[in-house]
Image: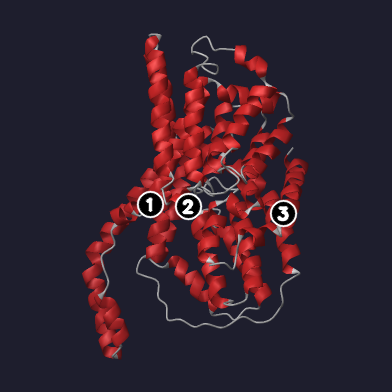
Amino acid sequence: MPTQSRNSFAKPVTTLLISLFALFLAPSAFAQASAEKIDLTHHFVGYFAVTMFIVAYALVIAEDYLHLRKSKPVLVAAGLIWFALGWIYTQHDMSELAKEVFEHNLLEYAELLLFLLVAMTYINAMEERRVFDGIRVWMISKGLSLRSLFWLTGVLAFAISSFANNLTTAMLMCAIVLKVAKGNKTFINLACINIVVASNAGGAFSPFGDITTLMVWQAGFVHFEEFFTLFIPACVNFLVPAVIMSLFISNEPSKVILEEFEMKRGAKRIVFLFILTIVTSVIAHSWFGMPPVLGMMTGLGYLKFFGYYLRRSLPRSLAKKRSEAQKRKDEKALRRLGQVVPFDVFDKVAQAEWDTLLFFFGVVMSVGGLGFIGYLTLISEAMYTNWDPTYANIAAGVLSAIVDNIPVMFAVIAMDPAMGLDQWLLVTMTAGVGGSLLSVGSAAGVALMGQSKGNYSFFGHLKWSWAIALGYIASILVHLAINH
């Protein structure tokens, strides 16, 4: 799911470069103004808005150094941009137009916010019920060879990230690798690279796999079932570098680690309810023409009813299990039962990644403001008129290795260039998998650098960027061959 903000020392000037790129390549666009809105691209309000966005994004980039949550600067930037727009439009007696555009952007954000909030709530519920721990314990108990472990963690990362947050997926697989291959730095680095690539590729062919795919689906550019035509290109994106890296991994067996494990009550039923929620969301959009968020909020109702059932039936369930443990004289089980707390849906809602969700608000509203000013028209003119759309969409993917893919994709959607389905699928894929080119290009890569404590690093990833680039190129060629 929604994908998280990324940090890189290479990012501070990127937004400025985009603006300058538009300025020099499409000067004629400055003279074009909508009959309904004011062209502010040459006005001090426009320059002020771009400056605020650049400053805010520079602070986002420096998050790890400043220990400043990424949502704070973009929230302030969004507020200042729209205050400035409100002021200038009031001066021209056009405040209603500014308000209408602001509310349009706010509605787009609200639909995405509620959709992501429900998805995050389900993922948190499954995590609390120990669904993901069950996968981890099963894998470390098998004594697989290092090469088999490399492939299994990659394939699972690819599969799970198609419906779950790629950050959560990557961290789960990395925890397995760190536990089983402790001390083997070379293997851990290769396995983490593979996990990052697989997580990003897995999210590219599903509307639920990444925030960017979700945005494209909700905007109506690609229908739900059409995303799955990206499955083969996404597989190629993952498999090409994986095959190359696997040749450098030994076939020695890994450690067998046995752990006592039991999923919490209701875990499998919550997985079923999540699948049912996805089906409900697809039906709402495909059969009834309603926004997908309608199905997701209905699915939250499913979880709330099930949470009510778990709370009401907990005393009876505990009494039964306590009786069985006493008969077996199982002291560990009795202690564990004494620590059980009731399932609380609102606790899972509170655990959602609110910093990411609020960061998303700042990005959507800031980019929406820049689009209202007229800058996105300039960039669209520069990229999608002066260039072939294929090259523009490939460049957007490379850019997402440096800049967060959320503003990149939202900017493309806001530009609404005249493209066919094949090109919308292409930019959806490249924006999703382009972040794999650098370790700092995706939330998964940034998180694994911290989690692995030096075993996986920026330069360790960079050594294999050539192999990842081959997968990136191959996936584009396959997509153009089968979906053009």
**Pointers 3 and 2 in contact (CB under 8 A)?**
no
| Residue to which mark 2 is pinned | 65
**Pointers 3 and 1 in contact (CB under 8 A)?**
no
Residue 107 visible: no
Q: Residues within 10 Å of mark 3 (few under 14, many from 20)?
A: many
Of tags 1 and 2, the one toward the viewer is 2
Give above or below for 121 relative to 391.
below
Give the mark nearer the N terminus: 3 vs 2.
2
Q: Residues within 10 Å of mark 1 (few under 14, many from 20)?
A: some
Give above or below for 3 relative to 172.
above
Q: Secondary structure at mark 2?
A: helix
**What amino acid type is highlighted by mark number 3?**
Val
**What amino acid type is highlighted by mark number 1?**
Ala
**What amino acid type is highlighted by mark number 2?**
Tyr
Residue placed most toward the observer, 481 or 172: 172
Quadrant where the image shows the C terminus:
top right
Q: CA distance from mark 1 to mark 2?
A: 24 Å
| Residue to which mark 3 is pinned | 236
Residue placed most toward the observer, 295 or 196: 196
Residue 238 in picture, x, y percent from top left:
68, 56
Of tags 3 and 2, the one toward the viewer is 2
Q: CA distance from mark 3 to mark 2?
A: 36 Å
Q: Residues within 10 Å of mark 2 (few under 14, many from 20)?
A: few
Residue at 46 percent across and 71 percent down: it is 134
Q: Secondary structure at mark 1?
A: loop
Q: Is residue 50 left or right of residue 17?
A: left
Q: Secondary structure at mark 3?
A: helix
| Residue to which mark 1 is pinned | 352
Residue at 52 percent across and 33 percent down: it is 219
**Pointers 1 and 2 in contact (CB under 8 A)?**
no
The chosen color scheme is secondary structure
Residue 88 in picture, x, y percent from top left:
41, 15
